[in-house]
Amino acid sequence: MTTTPEFPEVEAEPGSLLALVHEQLDDDQAQDVVTIPLEGKSSVADHMVIASGRSTRQVASMAQKLAERIKQEAGGSVRIEGLPAADWVLIDAGDVVVHLFRPEVRSFYNLERMWAFGDAPPVAGHA
């Protein structure tokens, strides 16, 4: 997992959905994995995981394997967007949202920048 001053390493509780996501991405050799805690910043999920694959083929494979594993082991429903092109695939697993990119596409959209240093406004009702 990649850590930066903006995004220090997030410890996933063993057996949690986040731990499952980290383990599967590690098994699939995802690159530059960053986990962003969203609690208090967004009501969408508790964590956002952003990772890169070396090609559209690897991004698609990682997304399919991750979605299948979440369904099997966590019993959750999973929504996948962007799989046909596989430049940017979004996996919505409820408490964890995963963005898988080809490196050039990740660099262009730079999602991490939106969440860096707490720049994102807090969700109404949260401190």
Image: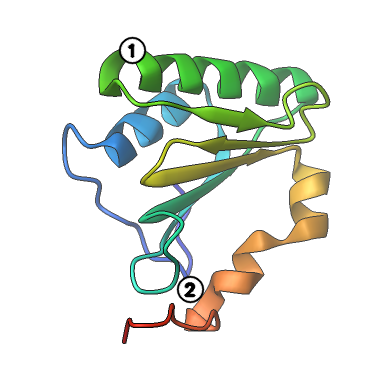
Q: Which mark is residue 114?
A: none
Is label 1 in a helix, a strand or a loop?
A: helix
Whole-percent x, y for residue 21 in the image: 39, 33
The amino acid pointed to by label 2 is: Glu
Residue annotated with mark 2: 6
> Residue at point 58% right, 22% down?
62
Whether residue 78 sits left or right of residue 30 in the image: it is left
| Spot occupied by residue 97 in the image (x, y as percentages of width and height) | 49, 45
Query: Is 6 located above or below residue 22 in the figure?
Result: below
For the point 35% across and 56% down, the residue is: 46
Q: Is residue 90 above or below residue 40?
A: above
| Percent x, y of residue 20 | 32, 30
User: In the figure, 116 relative to 100: above or below?
Assistant: below
Kindly identify the residue that appears in the image at 51 percent across and 83 percent down.
121
- Tell me if mark 1 has few (under 14), some (14-19) or many (20+) residues whose alpha carbon lies within 10 angstroms of its own: few
Disc 2 from disc 1: Cα separation: 33 Å
Q: Residue 5 placed where, x, y %? A: 46, 74
Left or right, residue 113 beside residue 73: right
Q: Could you classify mark 2 by the number of other residues whose Cα lies within 10 Å: few (under 14), some (14-19), or many (20 or more)?
A: few
Give the side of residue 38 with respect to residue 85, left or right.
left
Residue position for label 1: 72
